[in-house]
Image (cartoon, rainbow, N blue to C red):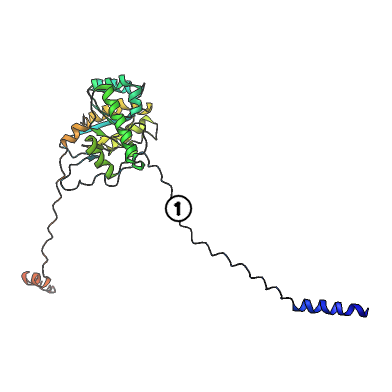
Amino acid sequence: MIRFLPVLFLSLAAASAAPKPAPATPAPAPPAPAAATPAPPPATALPATALPADASAPPPAGMPKSTFSQCHVEGPYVAMTFDDGPHGANTPRLLEMLRQRKIHATFFLVGQCVAEFPDIVKKIVADGHEIANHSWSHPQLSTMSEATVRDQLQKTHDAIIAACGVTPTIMRPPYGAFTARQRAWAHGEWGYKCILWDVDPLDWKVRNSEHVKTEILKQTVPGSIILSHDIHKTTVDAMPETLDALLAKGFKFVTVSELIAMDKPVAPKPKATPAPKTDASETAKAEPAATPVPAAKPKP
């Protein structure tokens, strides 16, 4: 037992001399995450009736007016317009209705439909109607690059010329969505005027002929550009009564370009001249003093 004591003593001495391990340093807390920047809300497709906020704004000085949603005309002239065709069944029916009433309208054509029904495009032109560009596949142009918009409009422009030999001079952007810069660019590129509307029966949404007729009759005024869609059977079904009622009200139908040719600038309203202020004391001096009424004498 005694011989083991030196060994035990040396072991204890070595243990006490060994360096003690440093206490573990706690890992630094990760920095608080920076407040996340909220992602921009996703772009929402415009409803079919949306109009650019500056659609009715006057053009910059020295620039011709190139956007029309309504015209200021002398007389009961209106323009009936039909979008998204031609349609294989509905458009020929509509053309017969217009022919019977000797009415000329304007058709904003989708390029894909032009390529599918070139004979109907020829018939539209032969009947004296105006045709116009409504893009190739009906996308929302205001969200697209210039190259993509050019492709949409140029392909339709070329398809219309190939189908009937007529060069379109006006266009309508799908959903009415076309920025001011795009409108100026399209006018410079093709000479297009951008045509919007002031009468919308929501026929794309409410597929009811009576509703279409009622809304058109309620909203139409001289100079109106009336929006409708000949791809919907209910819209074409509404046309005989609608057109007859408008004619009975005295409206006269012209194409959009004819209506634009009649457009006149709206004269500014004269400012009312305020009446001169009158000093109350001067007024009192000018007025004669009231004659006092004598008190009634008591009767005897």
Q: Residue 84's image quarter?
A: top left
Relative to the observer, which residue lies in front, 206 or 51? 51
Q: Residue 266's image quarter?
A: top left
Q: Quadrant of the C terminus?
A: bottom left
**Does residue 30 appear in the picture of this structure?**
yes
Residue type, numbered disc 1: Ala
x%, y% of residue 249? 22, 31
Mark 1 neighbour class, 10 Å CA radius: few under 14, some 14 to 19, many 20 or more? few
Q: Is residue 62 left or right of residue 243?
A: left
Q: Quadrant of the N terminus?
A: bottom right
In percent of the image, x 26 and y 38: which residue is there?
186
Q: Residue 88's image quarter?
A: top left
In percent of the image, x 17 and y 38: which residue is there?
263
The tally of labels here is 1
Quick one: SS at disc 1? loop
Relative to the observer, which residue lies in front, 19 or 82? 19
Q: Which residue is mark 1?
A: 39
Q: Is residue 60 left or right of residue 5?
A: left
Q: Is residue 270 left or right of residue 143?
A: left
x%, y% of residue 68? 23, 39
Relative to the observer, which residue lies in front, 234 or 180? 180
Q: Is residue 236 above or below residue 2?
A: above
**Does residue 230 appear in the picture of this structure?**
no
x%, y% of residue 267? 14, 46
